[in-house]
Image (tube, rainbow, N blue to C red):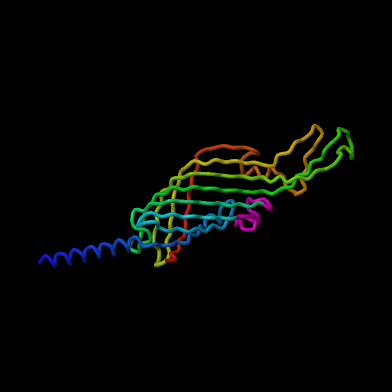
Amino acid sequence: MKRYFIIVLLLSQVNSFAQSDTSSRRHLFIKIVPLTYAGIFGAIQLGLETNINARSTVAFDYAYGNSNLSSSGTNGTYIEGETCQRYRLEYRKYQRPFAMKSNHLNPFWGIELFNRTNVYPSITTIGRGNGSVGADQYNYYERLSDDTVYKVWGTFVKLGIQEQISDRFWLEGYLGLGISQHTNTTGKYTLGPYDHVFTFDGYDKNFFFDFHSPLNSKFTGLDFLLSMKVNYRIF
């Protein structure tokens, strides 16, 4: 009888390990964000998510956008030559095991680190003047790189839900609240009392600032997230 008891105990432990291994299986999702493409700064965003145990995952997203990728008219809100890159690093905790087929609805919470960088390349021409009036009021012209760089760094807490819609596809949506820091800087140069700044790129830089912070500014405040993602399970 003792021998049978030991055999049953061992079989139960093997079964327990098998169940644990099944629920903790490593999965990998590729994540697509259609709302990013439709935003005011259109971009293509892709991401990967994998679990580190049964219910915890890590994810990384990258997005790139410019005027040619925007769906908002010909150039959207981008100025010609402006590019945007976004990075997201996230830790999630699901209510149920990650990517299990039997879990059609799986709520989660997460913590995300976010960065967005917009770069507006520009060449500034400065007329170095001598105080005279007329066509020869500038001694010479100097051309300088004067790129404007707008950056956002943020930390967010997110609540969301993931739903299975087929054997391989999942749909997720979430809301987030956090704090972000915005900076907008441009090139530094020194102007004399008779110098004047010109631009030969055909665009007024004030137009760029209509969609960003004022020039050479920095501020921190509350920020919100709202997104939907389509996820495909690779394995």
Q: Position of residue 150 (x, y in %)?
A: 61, 44
Q: Is residue 73 magenta?
A: yes
Q: Quadrant of the C terminus?
A: bottom left
In this view, the residue farthest toward the front is: 3
Give residue 2's position: percent from left, percent from top. 11, 65
Residue 47 picture location, percent across and down: 50, 58
Q: Is residue 45 above or below residue 137?
A: below
**From what the image shows, is residue 174 above or below residue 168?**
above
Image point (54%, 57%), residue name: 45
Quarter of the image for residue 104 reads bottom left
Q: Residue drawn at (45%, 58%), measured in percent from left and top?
A: 49
Of 88 and 207, nearer the camera is 88
Residue 177 or 125: which is nearer the viewer? Answer: 125
Query: Is residue 148 on the magenta stretch?
Result: no
Which quadrant would residue 42 be assigned to in this image? bottom right
| Above or below: residue 111 compared with residue 29 | above
* Dominant secondary structure of the residues highlighted in magenta in the image: loop
Residue at 43 percent across and 62 percent down: it is 28
Residue 218, horizontal then vertical, whole percent: 59, 37
Q: Which portion, as a residue range, is magenta?
A: 65-81
Q: Tell me: 25 left or right of 215.
A: left
Report the residue at 25% width, 65% height from top.
Answer: 14
Asked whether, in this view, residue 80 is left or right of residue 139, the answer is: left
Instruction: State how many labels appear.
Output: 0
Instruction: Assign the N terminus to one quadrant of the image.
Output: bottom left
